Amino acid sequence: MSVEDLPAEKIIARFYTVIDSDADGRLTKKEIEYSPLASLSKQWDKLNADGDGVIDRAEWTRYWAETDLGMSNAEFKAYLVDAVKNCGIDVSDLIESHKDLKAKQKLNIVPSEQLAARIYTVMDVKADGGPSKRDVSCGPLAEQLASHMTDMDTDADNKISVTEWNSFLKKKEEAFGADAYKQFLRDVVWEADVDCSDLVSADFKAVEKYQTLGSDALIKRLWDTIDSDSGGSIEKNEVLYSPFKEMLMPYWGKLDADQSGRVSSEEWNSFLKKLKQEKGEAGFNKFLAYMTYQGDVDVSDLLDPAPVVVNNAQASSEERQCCLVM
C-alpha cells in the first residue's frame, strides 16, 4: 500500500492532527501559519466560516468537502497526495505492510458489538458513561471519529450518550451493510491503536463450551455476579465498575426501562427477552456465553457437576426390588 491508496478522508484527518500543535481539538490561524501546511492560511476566511477565530473538525471537514466539489475525484486525490509529499506529512502509520494486514485480520474474529463497546470505552476517558466533545476531539480516536461528532451528538449537548452511540452505529450499519460496517469498526480500532488484545486472544472454545450450558443457567449466574451486593437489583455503578461494563453499558437505557437508576429482575428479564428476539436463539446464547467468559464468571460447577453418590446398601435394596418386579 502507498499514500496514493489511502482514502481521502484519512489524509484530511491527518492534516488536521498535524496542524493542531497543542492537541486541543481546534485550529487557530497561527497554528496553520506555523505548520507544514502553512499555505492553507490563505483560505482562512473559508475555513473559519463562522468567524469565531478557531476551526473545529466539522468546519475542517466541510471545507474539504466544498473543495472536492470543485474538482474531479482524481484531481482532488492527486491534490491531497501532492500535499502529503510536498509538505512532508507523515502517514507511514496509515500505510499498512503485509505484516500489519495479517495482524489486522485477527480482529475478524471479534464480534462487532465488542469492537463498538471497546471504542466507546476508549472515548469515555473519564468513565462517567458519556464522552464529551472534547474527549473525542482531543482523544486517541480524534482522527477517526471527531468528524462524526454532529451525527453522534444528536441532541447537541456536547456529550455522546450510550443511546446516541447506539443510534449512530445502527445508522452506519444500515447504510454500509453488515460486512462494511464491521470493517468500519475494525478500521477505527486499528488506526487509533485501540488495545483489543484481550478480545483477539479470547478462548473461543471456552465460549462455545459455555453456550452448551443453556441461556437460563447463564442468565441467573450473570445476574448473581453483577448484583454484587445481593440487593435484589443492579445499580448503575455495579455495571460501571464491573467486567461487564463494555457489554452492558451500551444497553443501559434499555435495561433501566423506568430510568430509576437501577435494574430490577423484571427489567433484566424483559431486556433479555427482547435481546433474544433481536439476536435469535444462537446469537443470544453466544452473547451470554461471551459475557460470561469476558467477566470471568465462575461456572465450573455447571460445567462439571458433582457426581451423585449412591448409598451401596440402598442401591442393593433397589436392585433387589427391581429383580422382584421383573
Image (cartoon, rainbow, N blue to C red):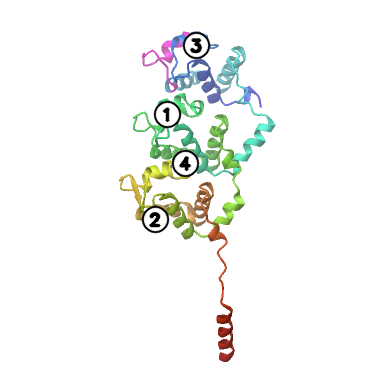
Mark 3–mark 2 CB contact (< 8 Å): no
Q: What residue is at 63 percent from the left and 38 percent from the top?
A: 105
Distance from label 3 to label 1 (Cα)? 24 Å
Label 2: how many residues lie within 10 Å, few (<14), some (14-19) or many (20+)? some
Residue 49 is one of the magenta-drawn residues = yes
Front residue (pair 313, 305): 313
Distance from label 4 to label 3 (Cα)? 36 Å
Distance from label 4 to label 2 (Cα)? 28 Å
Task: Please state which amino acid type lies under the numbered disc 3.
Answer: Leu
Distance from label 3 to label 2 (Cα)? 57 Å
Locate residue 319, reporting x and y percent.
Answer: 58, 84
Residue underneath mark 4:
174
- Observer-side mark, 4 or 3, equals 3
Give the mark nearest the N terminus, 3 or 2: 3
Q: What label sits on residue 5 in the rendered view? A: none
For residue 48, which quarter of the picture? top left
Distance from label 4 to label 1 (Cα)? 19 Å
For residue 100, which quarter of the picture? top right
Task: Please state which amino acid type lies under the numbered disc 2.
Answer: Asn
Locate residue 183, reporting x and y percent.
Answer: 56, 37
Q: Which range is magenta?
A: 41-57
Task: Please state which amino acid type lies under the numbered disc 4.
Answer: Glu
For residue 131, which quarter of the picture? top left
Task: Please state which amino acid type lies under the numbered disc 1.
Answer: Met
Locate residue 137, reporting x and y percent.
Answer: 45, 25
Q: What label sits on residue 269 in the rendered view? A: 2
Residue underneath mark 3:
40
